Image: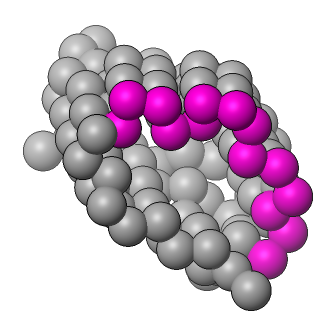
Amino acid sequence: MNNIRLNGKIIKGVDVQNPLDVTTIIIEEDVEEIADNAFENLYNLHNVFISDKSKLRRIGKCACKNCFNLVNLNLDACNRLEIIEDEAFSNCSSLSIIRLSN
């Protein structure tokens, strides 16, 4: 299992030797955007955890495309989330729970 913590204003992707090892991504509070295709083809990604103090405003087009094993996505803490672009979660066939804030 490989947990990756990501911070910075815009997440453009994951820089790892073997993307198949990435199972969990933890988005820190300073992240405002997950760019287009940022996590595309992370086939073994199971969970994306987002900080309780999230500043996330945008999830880009195809951001999690082909993350076949993504099961749980909790966006409940994303009070500033304005945009989830087209196909952000396309082909995420195992995704059974998406929680959104009020």
Q: Is residue 84 magenta?
A: yes
Quadrant in the picture for residue 30: bottom right
Report if residue 51 is visible in the image. no
> Residue at (28%, 13%) from the top-left corner?
17
Q: Residue at x 28, y 20 (%)?
A: 19
Labels in figure, total: 0
Image location of residue 23, percent across then percent down? 23, 43
Across and down, in percent, residue 21 comes to 18, 29
Quadrant of residue 2 within the rendered picture: top left
- Expressed as whole percent of the image width and height from the top left, the position of residue 32 reads 80, 51
Relative image position of residue 93 (x, y in whole percent) = 28, 40
* Residue under the image location 33 percent in, 52 percent down: 95
Magenta stretch, residue numbers? 79-92
Task: Describe residue 72's horizontal placement relative to residue 101 as left or right.
Answer: left
Instruction: Please identify the residue farthest to the top as the structure is shown.
Output: 17
Looking at the rendering, in which quadrant would you find the C terminus?
Answer: bottom right
Q: Quadrant of the N terminus?
A: top left
Judging depth in this view, the residue of 69 and 3 nearest the camera is 69
Q: Judge left or right: residue 50 versus residue 32.
A: left
Q: Quadrant of residue 6?
A: top right
Question: Taking 87 as reference, is 82 above or below it?
Answer: below
Front-most of 15 and 82? 82
Q: Nearer the viewer, residue 7 or 79?
A: 79
Q: Is residue 2 magenta?
A: no
37, above or below 11, in the image: above
Is residue 66 among what the camera can see?
Answer: yes
Q: Main secondary structure of the magenta part?
A: loop
Q: Residue at x 48, y 31 (%)?
A: 90
Question: Taking 72 as reference, is 78 above or below it?
Answer: below
